[in-house]
Image (cartoon, grey):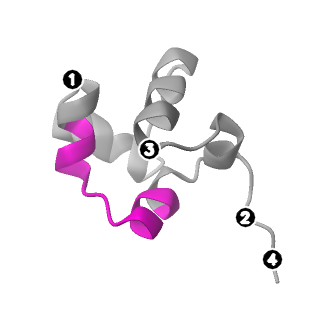
Amino acid sequence: MNRIKEVMEEKGIKQTWLSERLGKSYSQVNGYVQNRHQPRLEVLFQIAEILEVEVKTLIEEKPKK
């Protein structure tokens, strides 16, 4: 499972914007966001760079308060 959707929501980023930045189709990015597909490690690093977060932020569970 990844936290791409949560991080995008926190930052107010849309899937279309991320897909354009990644050079991937909207449906591919939607699969990542909905956890139907997991991105390859290289792609995960690209997503982290685009979203300006560390990779671990995208894969670690958010601490419960």
Residue 64, horizontal then vertical, whole percent: 81, 77
What SS does tag 2 mark? loop
Instruction: Determine contact: label 3, label 4, CB under 8 Å.
Output: no
Q: Is residue 11 left or right of residue 30?
A: right
Disc 1 marks a residue whose amino acid type is: Gly
What SS does tag 4 mark? loop
Label 2 neighbour load within 10 Å: few <14, some 14-19, many 20+: few
Instruction: Determine contact: label 2, label 3, CB under 8 Å.
Output: no
Q: CA distance from mark 2 to mark 4?
A: 6 Å
Q: Is residue 56 left or right of residue 43?
A: right
Residue bearing mark 3: 51
Q: Is residue 13 magenta?
A: yes
Q: Nearer the viewer, mark 2 or mark 3?
A: 3
Disc 2 marks a residue whose amino acid type is: Lys
Residue bearing mark 4: 64
- Residue at the top extreme of this rendering: 42
Q: CA distance from mark 2 to mark 3?
A: 16 Å
Disc 4 marks a residue whose amino acid type is: Lys
Q: CA distance from mark 3 to mark 4?
A: 22 Å
First in sequence: mark 3 vs mark 1: 1
- The segment highlighted magenta reads 6-19
Residue 43, horizontal then vertical, whole percent: 45, 22
Residue at the spot 57% in from the left edge and 19% down from the top edge:
41
Residue 27, horizontal then vertical, whole percent: 21, 40
First in sequence: mark 2 vs mark 3: 3
Residue bearing mark 2: 62
Instruction: Determine contact: label 2, label 4, CB under 8 Å.
Output: yes
